[in-house]
Image (spheres, rainbow, N blue to C red):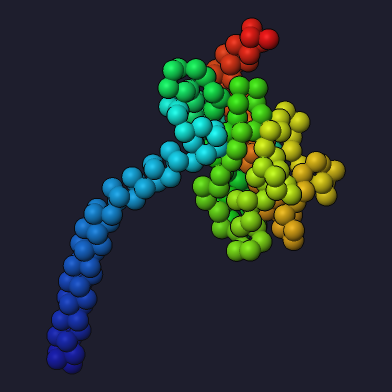
Amino acid sequence: MKKLESSLTNMVLVLTGVAVIMGGILAFVNHLTEEPITAQKEKALADGIKTVMACKDLVVAKTDEVKQNDDKGKELTYTVYEIQDSKGNDLGAAVESSTLGFGGALKVLVGFDLEGKILGYTLLEHAETPGLGAKADKWFQKGQKGDIIGKDPQEPLTVSKDGGQVDAITASTITSRAFLLAVNNAYKAYKVTPAADAETSATKQVK
């Protein structure tokens, strides 16, 4: 019996030691990869902003965090990047927005011009079915079946199946609804920022 207790104790000590060593190794590896992963995400975001604003020569003049409640009363946070060209002229804003798609979180970055029209978009994150819902990265681009580029979401964008003006992705109505909801919410977040008020005034003066 004593021999069994001794053996059990040794096993526990060995397992504990292995766990501590493995934990240390994982922490070290995580520390090594954390910086490159962060840098990669920052580069992806910077490239995404250039894509959705349809302009390569730009700077992020200011970043705003906007909190709004969705239709169910849940508070959501949107990141609004106010964009200027290299000469300091306002171009509009790029907005990060997310919602739930068919497979999980659907995160988009949408670019708006000074009048609130959509300049472009890109998917930052999604868990949609490959070949179906994942088509959202192309389906709503300029010249495609669900083209939303140039549209003004002042009147919320909805799929034609719901009486709207946008063709849903074939066999992926849920994803299409989620995507358009994210775009509509991005527009609402942009319009409540001080930048939107200033840009609207500037546009009126030019006219």
Q: From what the image shows, is residue 37 above or below residue 112?
A: below
From the viewer's side, name the closer residue of 191 and 205: 205
Q: How many numbered dots are placed on residues in this image?
A: 0
Q: Quadrant of residue 120?
A: top right
Which residue appears farthest toward the top when viewing the image?
205
Q: Quadrant of residue 69?
A: top right
Q: Residue at x 33, y 45 (%)?
A: 39
Q: Give coordinates of residue 147: x percent, y percent.
A: 71, 43
Q: Residue at x 24, y 54 (%)?
A: 32
Q: Is residue 114 left or right of residue 32?
A: right
Q: On the rendered image, what quadrant is the C terminus found in?
A: top right
Q: On the rendered image, what quadrant is the N terminus found in?
A: bottom left
From the viewer's side, name the closer residue of 116 and 194: 116
Residue 75 in sight here: no
Residue 48 in sight here: yes
Q: Give coordinates of residue 132: x percent, y percent.
A: 66, 61
Q: From what the image shows, is residue 89 above or below residue 102?
A: above
Which residue appears farthest toward the right when viewing the image?
163
From the viewer's side, name the closer residue of 159 and 9: 159
